[in-house]
Image: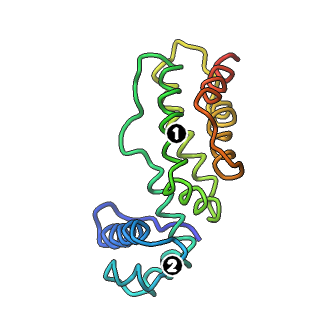
Amino acid sequence: MTAPTLRPGGRSARVQESIHTAVRELLEEQDRASVTVPQIAARAGVTPSTIYRRWGDLAALLADVAMARLQPETESTNTGSLPGDLRAWAEQYLDEMNSEPGRGMLRDVQASLKPAYCATIIGGQLQAILNRYPDQPNPGVDRLINLIAAPIVFRILFAEAPLEVEELHRLIDIALNQ
């Protein structure tokens, strides 16, 4: 099931935002395993059937909230150089995804029916950085995802320790040395 297409500012958007807010609040207050659709519905002021009708199940709702949180609220840091911008972006991404909420978001997105949406969001962020430097060699978004974002996510999800910042910087250098 996919997230509904909503009119900005309409009743559907307000209902979706109240449900997303309820999910975020409940996840801050209690363990994710104890959050239920009835709790979310009560907090949001809707019936559980509203949630099931829009998202199908709790996992899809959690993934939708996680993907919404992945959308950047502001433009990435502009340091004046492509390597500097990529380092700033990658360090922030590493910090955010290695946090407990970030790890939960990664798990929710991974379990969703649309995990590729995460790559679309990250790809958009990286393309915006590349667009700032049209006169510099462009390694391409796929190369940046493969050499920067993928190792971050892999280490967070499957290793005992996250990627070290020094190694992250080396991967950025490799990505830029086409």
- In the displayed structure, does residue 21 sit left or right of residue 115? left
The disc label shown at residue 124, or none: 1
Q: In this rendering, is residue 90 above or below 42? A: above
Judging by the rendered image, the residue that carries numbered circle 2 is 34
Q: In this rendering, is residue 98 above or below 86? A: below
Tag 2: amino acid: Ser
Q: Quadrant of the N terminus?
A: bottom right
- In the displayed structure, does residue 120 sit left or right of residue 48? right
Whole-percent x and y of residue 112?
A: 62, 65
Report which quarter residue 6 is drawn in: bottom left
Q: In this rendering, is residue 9 above or below 53? A: above
The residue positioned farthest toward the front in the image shown: 160
- In the displayed structure, does residue 5 sit left or right of residue 114? left
| Tag in front: 1 or 2 | 2
Whole-percent x and y of residue 63?
A: 54, 64
Instruction: Residue at 50% x, 37% y: name it.
Output: 125
Tag 1: amino acid: Gly
